[in-house]
Image (spheres, rainbow, N blue to C red):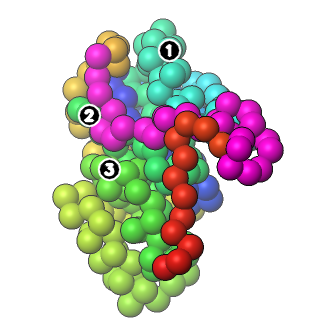
Amino acid sequence: MRFITVSGPPSSGKTSIILKTIDALQDRGIKTGVVKFDCLATDDDLLYEKKGIPVRKGLSGALCPDHFFVSNVEECVQWGIKQGVDLLVSESAGLCNRCSPHIKEITAVCVIDNLSGVNTPKKIGPMLKSADIVLITKGDIVSQAEREVFASRVKTVNPSATIMHVNGITGQGSFELSTLFTGGEDIETLKGKMLRFSMPSALCSYCLGERRIGDSYQMGNVRKMDMEK
């Protein structure tokens, strides 16, 4: 079974693109499953179920979504193998812009949209910087000049990535993307593989549940702003 990580900011169009790409994969006889990771709530799993796509949903709750992802991804891979899928897609929203679900030797995709702001690419962090493929959406509602400037900013952040303009509503780019999805090697497990970027996991008092404000309540990993600058 092949495995792919797809991540991107909320509402960037990840689910729509994956659904259209799975249509193209099914036309080629490739059975695909999806694991949807989110923080508090999502109904995206229902969209996959309606199309008969095997799907599992994981909500991280109070935990960092990417920490939750890496703590559960091996179990997800084993679930996909039991389902008999040829390809398992992991969909997750990058919510803190510091972590990344991308794994070495596993195809990594980042989805961002033209409406997120021209400076957004440099804010996203390792989720974009370490991706193999960057998909830019919502190009139909901005000008050609805006599309080109935004793509240039993405290229500056991640010069080695394959950059594609796709449309999750019309399906533009889905066939080409399905070809890229089928690249890579089959895996039986993720055990022993490495994340492409280390997650910030050092503890501070607030990670451990502290709610009171003030220096006397702050312990562990604390960094103060220089207010004189």
Residue 201 shows up from this direction: yes
122 to 206, vertically: above or below: below
Q: Earlier in the sequence, mark 2 or mark 3?
A: 2
- Callout 3 amino acid: Ala
- Which residue is situated farthest in the right direction here? 212
- Marks 3 and 1 sit apart, C-alpha to C-alpha, by 23 Å
Instruction: Report the amino acid beneath label 1.
Output: Glu
**In the rendered image of this protein, does residue 125 appear above or below residue 121?**
above
Determine crowd level at label 3: few under 14, some 14-19, many 20+ residues with C-alpha closer than 10 A.
many
Q: CA distance from mark 2 to mark 1?
A: 18 Å
* Label 3 element class: loop
**What is the number of the mark on residue 104?**
2
Query: In the drawing, does residue 205 fall left or right of residue 101?
Result: right
Q: Main secondary structure of the magenta part?
A: loop
Residue 131 is labelled as: 3
Boundaries of the magenta span: 192-217
Point 19% across, 58% down: residue: 160
Residue 123, quarter of the rendered image: bottom left
Residue beneath label 1, please? 75
Residue at figure coordinates x 61%, y 38% from the top left: 219
Asked if marks 2 and 3 touch (Cβ < 8 Å), the reply is no
- Between 97 and 9, the residue placed more toward the observer is 97
Residue 190 disc label: none
What kind of element bears circle 1?
helix
Q: Residues within 10 Å of mark 2 (few under 14, many from 20)?
A: few
